[in-house]
Image (cartoon, helix red, strand yellow):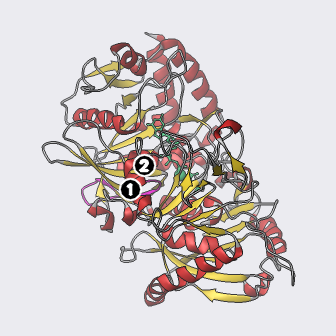
Amino acid sequence: MAALTQPDQIHWVDGSEAEYSKLTDELVEAGTLVRLNEEKFPKSFAAFSDPRDVARVEERTYICSKHERDAGFTNNWMAPARMRKKLKELFRGSMRGRTMYVIPFVMGHLDAEDPKFGIEITDSAYVVASMRIMAHTGTDVLNKMVELNADFVPAVHSVGAPLEPGQTDAMWPCNEEKWIVHFPEERSIWSYGSGYGGNALLGKKCYSLRIASAMARQEGWLAEHMLILKLTSPENQAHYIAAAFPSACGKTNLALLNPTVKGWTVETLGDDIAWMKLGKEGELRAVNPEAGLFGVAPGTGWDTNPNAMKALARGNTIFTNVALTDDGGVWWEGMTPTTPDHLIDWTGLDWTPALGRPAAHPNSRFCTPISQVAILAEEYYQPDGVPLSAIFFGGRRKTTIPLVTQSRDWTSGVFMGSTLSSETTAAAAGEVGVVRRDPMAMLPFIGYNAGDYLKHWLAMGKKGNPERLPQIFLVNWFRRDHDGSFLWPGFGENSRVLKWAIERIQGRAAAKETPIGFVPAQGSIDVEGMGITAEQLRTALAVDPDEWQTETDSTAKWYERFGESLPEELWLEQAHLEDRLARV
Ligand code: GTP
Ligand code: SPV
Ligand code: MN
């Protein structure tokens, strides 16, 4: 790689504190990082990206399987040989004038039965610093790889901005041209031109979802875009839950939930990715392969997510594209009830509320160690994970989708997941607010054919023990009233929905059977002490036949796009749903 990319020097990342301090000092010197007020945010920094490099670039993301059919219609594809040629041209000399960092990393536990190793090569020190927060990196990982003579996923990243002698560096070097490329058969990753988030921290979406989903299919497990949490009832019974919501649709917030419902507590296990395997008794066990949170900043505040705010107050955080306060702190929309009078916005300009534009980028993020979450469950450190009681699929939908629906069985739950939809957000480049289908919240992350992926989900259900497998629910925190306001207040109040789901599983909560599944019967969701009117709750839970007619027309069209790859069982689910709706 060095011969190809021609860096000035090579640095093997040892993962130490001293190395991190040196790197971040250099990044402050270079102007890429701003050191924050030590009292408010100890050992924390703010970074500001190039305005053309603020989110994942799905248009530029490729799955280069040997056969186009194996990438499927949800992915961009190019023949591997052609892509390799293109990448070689792009990477030739791409690290000139820079340091090549070699980051050994492991996703999940170093002492797992079969640890999942990677090596990221990058010319971005910001990526090295962020990867140290998001994953276990460094010499002990490398030693373990050597000791086990283990396979690893090679992951090459370049910002694509070689420096000529004497040329001054950009604050956020990147290239207009971006390529995020995966070779699932070879299990390798090449990323060019971007320094941002999932485009550049290759252990995250590229490895732990796209490559891992392809591994998981072969090895009989699941790699999913899910949070994991532990919910403890007043009777002190622990339940584990995973939930898949598309990007910027509430995973971090649910994972760090501060429950408002009396007597129940929540602890965090993961906020973005879950690897799930069948256990000895046919239960589904989940682990979080990540070591940090790369969370959406806007909307994170003391009122909505105090657990995230407390984690950030402990420091050791890299913020990207938030605004700076006059006292050396950070701010974003929704952080505090009152807006500061003056800020430096994420583009570096003076900002006052009168300007009427956001001070932080809508996809601005905090990157912080998960160990700083005070409510982190001790089971986070368990290599074999936790047995799931429930899986939630959810999206951002103004209409149609009720607050919560319980599926009839695994297959109808897979149907719910496969037809999941959401309005697009700022987490990916492109238009915001457009409804799109997002199967299992994995649309941008399935590393192989989406029809095969759904088949794999069905097969996992058949392999598992029906008595022990998680039950599947569909949720929507984002349904709107006629006046455009949210019908359900969300955040901590979502604990009431979790409680209902657990009580359903225990056969204790009442439900009404509808064509789409079981929704809470009147009075079965605990809304005590909550300021919601009976009318609002009814509207939030409503299954409207006209809306569902439109919805099933749309899911039928979605299924047609799969062609022959769609499992027959799911077409049957669609047909049965249409039938049930026709009989209402
Ligand atoms: P990624 O990290 O992109 O995968 O996102 P995520 O799924 O973790 O989303 P996150 O929890 O960061 O939430 C994204 C946005 O949705 C934030 O602005 C939140 O404030 C908002 N949000 C989260 N939960 C709720 C909710 O229950 N109701 C409402 N109205 N908004 C919510
Ligand atoms: C997402 O977009 O789902 C994220 C952020 O979690 S990124 O790491 O940029 O993919
Ligand atoms: Mn995500």
> Can residue 465 be seen at all in this image of the molecule?
yes
In the picture of the structure, the residue carrying the numbered disc 2 is: 459
Q: Which residues are magenta?
A: 270-285
Residue 385 x %, y %: 32, 62
Q: Please give the label number shown on residue 86.
A: none
Kindly identify the amino acid type of the residue bearing the numbered disc 2. Answer: Ala
Q: Is residue 237 left or right of residue 54?
A: left
**Residue in the picture at 77% in, 87% down:** 3
**Residue in the picture at 30% in, 33% down:** 496
426 relative to 54, above or below:
above
Q: Quadrant of the C terminus?
A: top left
Query: What is the C-alpha distance between the residues marked 2 and 1?
Result: 41 Å
Residue 221 x %, y %: 42, 58
Choose between 426 and 364: the one closer to the eye: 364
> Can residue 569 be seen at all in this image of the molecule?
no
Density class for disc 2 (Cα within 10 Å; few <14, some 14-19, many ≥20) is few
Choose between 152 and 571: the one closer to the eye: 152
524 relative to 197, above or below:
above
Asked which secondary structure carries label 2, the reply is helix
In the picture of the structure, the residue carrying the numbered disc 1 is: 310
Kindly identify the amino acid type of the residue bearing the numbered disc 1. Answer: Lys
**Residue in the picture at 42% in, 68% down:** 108
71 relative to 525, above or below:
below
Instruction: Mark 2 or mark 1: name the one nearer the start of the chain.
Output: 1
Q: Ligand 2 quadrant?
A: bottom right
Q: Is residue 352 left or right of residue 420?
A: right
Residue 258 x %, y %: 32, 44
